[in-house]
Image: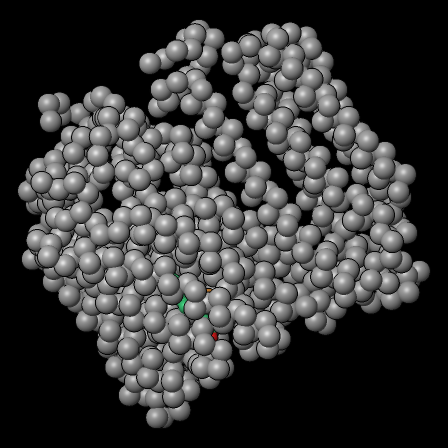
Amino acid sequence: MSSHTNYLNAKKGFASWALTIDHKRIGLMYLVSIMSFFLLGGLFALLLRTELLTPAHTIVDAKRYNQLFTLHGAIMVFLVIIPGIPASLGNFVLPLMLGAKDVAFPRINLASYYIYVLGAIVALSSLFVGAIDTGWTFYTPYSTTTDGGVVLMVTAAFILGFSSIFTGLNFIVTTHKLRAPGMTWFRMPLFIWGIYSTAVIQIMATPVLAITLLLLIVERTLKIGIFDPVLGGDPVLFQHFFWFYSHPAVYIMILPGMAVVSELIAVFSQKRIFGYKQIAYSSIAIAGISFLVWGHHMFVSGQSELVGMIFSALTFLVAIPSGVKMFNWLATMNQGSISFKTPMLWALGFFFLFAIGGITGVFLGTLSVDVHLHDTYFVVAHFHYVMVGGTFMAFMGGIFYWWPKMTGKMYSEFWGATSTLMVVVGFNVTFFVQFLMGAQGMPRRYYSYLEQFQIYHQISTIGSYILGLGFVTAMITLLVSLKKGQNAPANPWKAASLEWTHTDVIPIEHNFHEQPVVTEGPYEYR
Amino acid sequence: MNTGNDQLFPLHSHFERPAQQIDAAKLGMWLFLATEVLLFGGLFVAYAVYHYLHPDLFKAAHHFLDVRLGGFNTVVLLFSSLTVVLAIHGAQQGKKQMVLWNLFLTLLCASTFLVVKYFEYKHKFHMGLLPGYYFTNAMLPNPDQAHIFFGIYFLMTGLHGVHVVIGMIVLGWLFYRTWNNEFNPQYYSPLEIGGLYWHLVDVIWIFLFPLLYLIR
Ligand code: HEM
Ligand SMILES: [Cu+2]
């Protein structure tokens, strides 16, 4: 706390940011970019929901509607949730938590950021050649025959994959090779375990998506007949390829969320985390099992019944390590001295919403039930509960938690808590009714619907406005703190991991004044 | 803590020891190679699926590939793996000339490979044995599906060719750094890491050759 230079003011000027190889600055740049795309994707969502106020034409026509939901999905998945926590919070925190000066390959880290930006530019440029309307899943043969900027959007996803691979690669090597003296594997904060498991999936699944997308591009441009049945190809093969990546990808999304929540629950209960090793191993287990269940997206795509049954059974297995985490968090809170600070409120929001999302996932994994629910709003509600209710809540919690470390400022607790409440309420109003209408047969991605569903759609739309307002409030709260917030102490939450205990209020460029030596675990509160 | 010789080993500031930096770089490269294998893995799966669906077609189509040229290229690449190893060996002993010569030979092999590949491609273009849409050859028994084999052939060998080119860029860069006296018996890990990448390029070809040229 001696000197006043820190990573934010050590160097000045645009170039010092644009060419920085400091993981903390790169993390912040990612955070700003990701949040901007979140706002854009959110805007599309609000337009979609507004259109659905009536079954007829409300604000856009059917074609435009299809383009909007595709853009919404593709932006949220490829530009927001997948890079989300690892690239922003992970980049900022991981080396600090390990007691390292930086990630293993700082320049590759910067490259990954620019690859991300390039991917984003290519994705958005698809808007100018005619927006894509295939849905974020790019299913063939529709995606090989429809017009619009399919190739550009697919290329963008391909490029973004490399960004993701480089980030994952960096984190794995950093975790193996750059831990401080005394930082054994089981003294690492659980955040690291989660990010590490995520990185393993990023490395193993993303190349498969890359080749799939490449094949799709070639199919569209050269008509090689690999996915298009008219040319002798097999469209179900595309689905296999796609979900072989995209199911593990949903764990690329949720594992970092769980990683953040493990930290929040422990710190705000001021209690040693219950079942450290189980939580750590369950991350690895989830990463492993996630590669074996992709067929549950294809129960009605013409895969054999036997295969369907096997995938169904394997899907149930995923629920076990997820459940292990939930119960361990619950046991951690039990008898803890819980303080309901804003980050903890987000964590609790995660806790309830992810529970609903996860359990409905098990419903969907049940072969016979899914035949009824597949491609309905029930699925839409399920994945929003896990992706927004789970991952994004945790992301927000993490931002509020590490904000004082990133910026040196405290935000208004009142507005922080208010925004959390608005999000939780708005979220449930938006998506719970979608379970109901989905179970009654309302198909997803439809522009129009039967009269009987109108009331559900209208409730959902109103909910989405509250939800949007909640997120905007949260962001304003954070931004206002930069100007008006009080200066933060070095360790406002009395946390016990290195990024709080061994750094200045705002860390210096090389993180630590001297190399920390670790003698105990990350949850020894006193 | 820095146990290496500061003049000889360019240690990046976020590492404590030379061994740590070398290990990190190697682990990074191995992970990257894993992603490369998985990338090609998708194409191998596609190959397997279509070979299974159209076994006769694959048998008939592969006769249009030249086994002698493919075999020659296989030998060339295997030899280039040897020269890369010799280059690293030379670096360990501080023999600059040996490193340069072997890197040069490796680059020569890589270029030979590409030249041969060029003539193979040219021949196929000429015969209308092209992917998808552009397939115009009428000699195959099942012309409306025969293009699938050539789609896969061009994708696999094309992607491999791209890797050969990237490998050559890496080798050229290593050549330049050796020329500039950047390596010494303490510090030559970029050579090892570049070498690993080149071996991968070879290994992938070792699988492509029998799968495409030697179908029975
Ligand atoms: C307990 C864990 C989970 C189980 C058992 C599960 C199960 C399922 C099943 C069976 C489906 C297919 C439904 C259908 O299309 O008919 C599905 C869809 C989906 N799930 Fe999950 N899920 C789980 C967790 C997650 C998580 C953590 C995420 C993301 C963070 C997620 C995201 C998705 C998405 C995006 C889809 C829909 C994809 C689409 O068709 O567009 N799921 N889930
Ligand atoms: Cu899935």
The percent coordinates of residue B147 (x first, y second) are 80, 60
The percent coordinates of residue A396 (x first, y second) are 24, 55
Residue drawn at the location 59% of the way across and 42% of the way down:
B36
Q: How many marks?
A: 0
Residue drawn at the location 61% of the way across and 12% of the way down:
B91
Which sits in the foreground, A367 or A420? A367
Asked whether, in this view, residue A2 is left or right of residue B153, the answer is: left
Image quadrant for the C terminus of chain A? top left
Q: Is residue A366 above or below residue A328?
A: below
The percent coordinates of residue A378 (x first, y second) are 38, 78
The scheme the figure's colours follow is: one colour
Asked whether, in this view, residue A305 is left or right of residue A346, the answer is: right
Location of residue B97 (image quadrant): top right
Which sits in the foreground, A323 or B190? A323
Residue drawn at the location 63% of the way across and 26% of the way down:
B195
Location of residue A352 (image quadrant): bottom left
Residue A347 in view: no
Q: Is residue A76 above or below residue A162?
A: below
The percent coordinates of residue B152 (x first, y second) are 74, 54
Image quadrant for the N terminus of chain A? top left
Residue B49 in view: yes
Residue drawn at the location 67% of the way across and 17% of the way down:
B87
Q: Which residue extends farthest right? A: B139
Asked whether, in this view, residue A498 is left or right of residue B31, the answer is: left
